[in-house]
């Protein structure tokens, strides 16, 4: 049984499901705890249900970002500016209208 209140970022193993998960959000107003499993699945428990879960503390896995479906290559941003090769976009040929003065009097 879960006897301690979780913190965001804590990892647990659900002994009934034999799955590890991370606490990703706690909503005290709605009295819910949101968790994300290693496969990316998300689940939500109310505070009362949380206390009934057969949990044990777990260490964060080596690839903790696996549930977010991001590889290490996805995490690195490229500083290059991307310019579309196709200049036939009809929106690129629209010029803004110019006007002199104001029409709000």
Image (cartoon, rainbow, N blue to C red):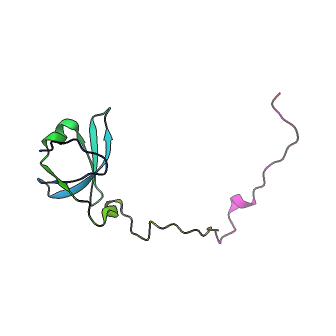
| Residue 93, percent from left and from top | 75, 60
Whether residue 64 is situated above or below residue 105 in the rendered picture: below
- Between 50 and 7, the one nearer to me in the picture: 7
- Between 91 and 81, the one nearer to me in the picture: 81
Q: Is residue 93 magenta?
A: yes
Whether residue 99 is situated above or below residue 89 in the rendered picture: above
Whether residue 60 is situated above or below residue 102 in the rendered picture: below
Residue name at image x 16 percent, y 40 percent: 51
51 sits left or right of 100 in the view: left
Q: Main secondary structure of the magenta part?
A: loop
59 sits left or right of 94 in the view: left
| Residue 18, percent from left and from top | 14, 58
Outermost residue, right direction?
100
1 sits left or right of 35 in the view: left
The image shows a total of numbered marks equal to 0
Bounds of the magenta segment: 82-103
Outermost residue, top direction?
105
Residue name at image x 36 percent, y 63 percent: 69
| Residue 72, percent from left and from top | 40, 69
Q: Can you say which quadrant of the picture contains the C terminus?
A: top right
Q: Can you say which quadrant of the picture contains the N terminus?
A: top left
Q: Is residue 97 magenta?
A: yes
Residue name at image x 13 percent, y 41 percent: 52
Whether residue 78 is situated above or below residue 56 in the rendered picture: below
């Amino acid at each position: 049984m879960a006897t301690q209140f979780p913190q965001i970022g804590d990892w647990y193993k659900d002994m009934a499901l034999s799955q590890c998960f991370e606490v990703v959000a706690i909503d005290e107003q709605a009295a819910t705890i949101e968790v994300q499993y290693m496969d990316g699945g998300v689940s939500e428990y109310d505070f009362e249900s949380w206390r009934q879960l057969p949990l044990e503390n777990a260490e964060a896995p080596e690839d903790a970002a696996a549930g977010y479906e991001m590889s290490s290559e996805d995490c690195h941003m490229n500083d290059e500016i991307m310019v579309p090769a196709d200049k036939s976009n009809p929106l690129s040929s629209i010029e803004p209208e110019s006007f002199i003065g104001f029409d709000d009097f």
